[in-house]
Image (cartoon, rainbow, N blue to C red):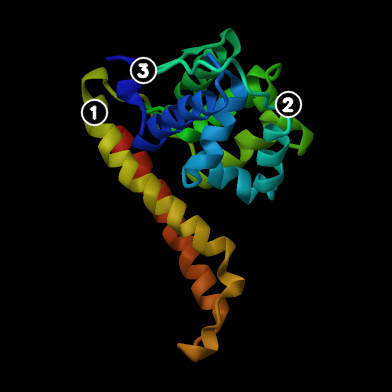
Amino acid sequence: MGIEDRMTDRARKVLALSNQEAQKWNHEYIGTEHILMGIIKEGSGVGFSVLTSMDVPMDKVSNSLLSTFRSGPDMVTMGKLSQTPRAKKVIEYAIAFARKMNHNYLGTEHIVYGLLQEGDGLGGAVLNAEGVTVGKYEIEVVKILGKGMGPVEESEDEKVIDMVGCGLCACEEICMLTRHIDAFNFEDITDKPKEMFEDLLKVMQQYCKHYVEKKLRT
């Protein structure tokens, strides 16, 4: 099974968007900067959610990247562009991180880790400038998703990707609610204290994490 077959839909979309971003600037390659722009443009993956949970100003990151972009030749290369050696390293590190986490899928959270671990590319450098290190990011990923409980048999990959994808979507939505709970006006809809809902969201987040772990084991 190829790498792309193990990718979540959002991870595949990130790579497609990075290809589009490179073509938009008439670049003949996909670099780490394009991959990070793909993460930002997709905007709903676990990788993006982890960065926002770390209070990384994603608008500022986007502007920092765009300020470095220069248009290439007038002729635009159509189709799938080749990745730079550093971009290829990002994917290699992403795969290694997925294995370390006992995840048998490749998601946006792993790709962001790859950008940070590669370190020398523009994508990782821009994140480092905002105080994001490999260690801090990994801690946040574990906090949100937890580690898988063990490797899954190779023949089960496709089933795992589908099931885990559902669990990750739920995790993302709950994390988003948790981060923005202060913006809700609970007095308009209930006389229950806000703290009750905060506790409930934490329980639901924990449940989703265990759901993902359970599906990785089945």
According to the picture, the residue beneath numbered tag 3 turns out to be 3
Q: Position of residue 217 (x, y in %)?
A: 30, 33
> Which of labels 1 and 2 is toward the front?
2
Count of picture labels: 3
Dot 1 or dot 3: first in sequence order is: 3
Q: Position of residue 20 (x, y in %)?
A: 46, 29
Q: Which mark is residue 125?
A: 2
According to the picture, the residue beneath numbered tag 1 turns out to be 158
Amino acid type, label 2: Ala
**In the rendered image, the vertical position of residue 52 relative to residue 108, given as above or below:** below
Side of 4 where 73 appears, left or right: right
Q: CA distance from mark 1 to mark 3?
A: 12 Å
The residue carrying pointer 2 sits among few (fewer than 14), some (14 to 19) or many (20 or more) residues within 10 Å by Cα, namely many
Q: Position of residue 76 (x, y in %)?
A: 48, 18
Q: Dot 3: what SS?
A: helix
> Which of labels 1 and 3 is toward the front?
3
Amino acid type, label 3: Ile
Question: Do callouts 1 and 3 mark residues in contact (Cβ within 8 Å)?
Answer: no
Residue at the image point whose x is 77% and y is 37% from the top = 131
Residue projecting furthest to the front: 74
**In the rendered image, the vertical position of residue 143 relative to residue 182, given as above or below:** above
Dot 1 or dot 2: first in sequence order is: 2
